[in-house]
């Protein structure tokens, strides 16, 4: 079991609330940066316990040592965020139930495909007053329809769940380069402000908007557009083409989000989670990088192979999200409305060549399929 850092705090006066305890569930590239951000704030703010527990999916490193032991000894996640000190108050814990037991603020930040299993393990194991935030980009598609990860967390664990998304390539925030992020919340503005306080730093500016689904869908769908941008780069089509693909992608992101949730606000697409995240992901993210290599191989190398070779254990999200969105589109008869999303999936599975990403003249969205009252674009 991981060691504990006990902070020396005075006993509470009447009316004072106990300091919140934070646990990070996940410890990949972004999970580790999230731990660093949070840990710098819990040390400064008296409303939080100093210690930040970080659940680590245990791995044995090539040296034979356990990843958690190395993190706790060196204060670095040598596999997913080498060279960056997390803060002495971050404690890596390989036991998920132990890691969440005392926490009333849970930060979920794992690749989305693992979340259903994680939630099942946590049922009945968390505090009743726990609040959650999801930094996870992706969705689950079930027979009854798409389920956002924040909804999965809320429903399975019976807790409120905000989201935090933005133009946040983890390695840049790790070295404290300025960026912004958006917290999406449902009703509890006070809780949203608490999350803003927990994550915000002078180099990481966080603001809150009352639109969980809009924020989360922006973060999720932009990974599909980044795959399209990577194809354009791999085919060396230039900046105008890439900008066109990004614009068409943003339009489809907005249309898809509004069709799924009429509550989604137009203004959310102008927050960091919207257009800013789209831009950074299409310029620099891992989805773009792997799609570029896929197109350069003429579609002959699989994304699984490229992920394993290029990402050192990190996970691609865009390919699985494209598949999930395709399932929703196909189930609801919306394929013709979303030519870019549809084409990305068909290229990923080898049904179309990478060059199909720019063959739109025959594929303008068929708005007539929609109820005339639905304002999408
Ligand atoms: N990296 C970024 O720049 C970035 C930025 C913003 C958001 N995100 C999002 O954050 C989320 C987490 O991404 P990341 O970059 O921290 O992770 P990552 O892709 O760097 O690392 C993969 C993680 O998955 C863990 N893992 C592997 N197998 C597992 C299993 N069976 N069960 C549970 N965990 C397992 C690994 O231990 C590792 O911690 C994703 O939804 C991603 O889209 C990432």
Image: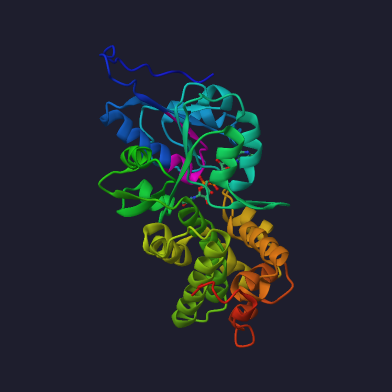
In the image, is residue 28 part of the stretch drawn in magenta? yes
Q: At 41% across and 31% down in the image, what residue appears?
A: 75
> Which residue in the rendered view is the most extreme toward the front?
373
Q: Residue furthest bottom?
A: 361
- The residue closer to the viewer here, 63 or 251, is 251
Q: Nearer the viewer, residue 262 or 60?
A: 262
Residue 5 percent across, percent down from the top left: 39, 19
Question: With respect to residue 191, does 361 lie above or below?
Answer: below
User: In x, y percent, where is residue 289?
Assistant: 53, 64
Q: Is residue 358 above or below residue 83?
A: below
The image quarter containing residue 291 is: bottom right
Q: What coloring was used for the rendering?
A: rainbow
Q: Is residue 142 above or below residue 70?
A: below
Residue closer to the observer: 177 or 97: 97
Place of residue 218 in the rendered image (x, y in percent of width and height, measured from the top left): 48, 59
| Residue ID at (54%, 76%) | 232
Residue 266 picture location, percent across and down: 42, 65
Q: Nearer the viewer, residue 288 or 224?
A: 224
Tell me which residue sits at (63%, 46%) in the image.
113
Magenta-drawn stretch contains 61: no
Q: Quadrant of residue 275?
A: bottom left
Residue depicted at 59% across the width and 55% down the height: 316
Q: Is 269 displayed left or right of 97 in the figure?
A: left
Residue 207 is at least partly visible in this image: yes
| Quadrant (top left/top right/bottom left/bottom right) for the N terminus | top right
Q: Is residue 99 above or below residue 240?
A: above
Ligand 1 in which quarter: top right
Number of callouts in the render?
0
Residue 301 in view: no
Magenta region, residue range: 22-33
């Amino acid at each position: 079991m991981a060691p504990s850092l006990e902070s020396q705090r005075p006993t509470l006066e009447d009316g004072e609330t106990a300091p919140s305890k934070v646990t990070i569930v996940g410890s990949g590239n972004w999970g580790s940066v999230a731990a660093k951000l949070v840990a710098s704030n819990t040390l400064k703010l008296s409303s939080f316990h100093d210690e930040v527990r970080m659940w680590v999916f245990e791995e044995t490193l090539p040296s034979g040592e356990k990843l958690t032991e190395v993190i706790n000894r060196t204060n670095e996640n040598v596999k997913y965020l080498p060279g960056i000190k997390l803060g002495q108050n971050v404690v890596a814990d390989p036991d998920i139930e132990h890691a969440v037991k005392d926490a009333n603020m849970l930060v979920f930040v794992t690749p989305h495909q693992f979340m259903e299993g994680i939630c099942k393990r946590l049922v009945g194991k968390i505090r009743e007053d726990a609040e959650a935030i999801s930094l996870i980009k992706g969705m689950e598609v079930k027979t009854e329809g798409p389920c956002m990860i924040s909804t999965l967390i809320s429903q399975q664990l019976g807790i409120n769940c905000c989201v935090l998304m933005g133009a946040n390539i983890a390695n840049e925030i790790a070295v404290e380069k300025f960026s912004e992020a958006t917290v999406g919340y449902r009703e509890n503005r006070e809780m949203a402000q608490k999350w803003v306080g927990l994550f915000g730093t002078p180099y990481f500016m966080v603001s809150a908007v009352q639109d969980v689904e809009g924020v989360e869908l922006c973060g999720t769908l932009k990974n599909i557009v980044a795959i399209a941008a990577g194809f354009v780069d791999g085919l060396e089509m230039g900046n105008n083409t890439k900008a066109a693909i990004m614009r068409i992608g943003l339009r489809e992101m907005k249309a898809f989000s509004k069709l799924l949730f009429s509550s989604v606000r137009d203004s959310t697409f102008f927050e960091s989670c919207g257009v800013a995240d789209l831009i950074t992901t299409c310029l620099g993210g891992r989805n773009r990088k792997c799609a570029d290599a896929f197109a350069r191989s003429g579609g002959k190398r699989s994304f699984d192979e490229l992920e394993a070779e290029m990402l050192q254990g990190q996970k691609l999200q865009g390919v699985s999200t494209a598949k999930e969105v395709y399932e929703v589109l196909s189930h609801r008869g919306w394929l013709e409305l979303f030519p870019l999303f549809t084409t990305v999936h068909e290229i990923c599975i080898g049904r179309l060549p990478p060059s199909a990403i720019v063959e739109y003249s025959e594929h303008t969205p068929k708005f007539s399929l929609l109820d005339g009252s639905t304002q999408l674009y």
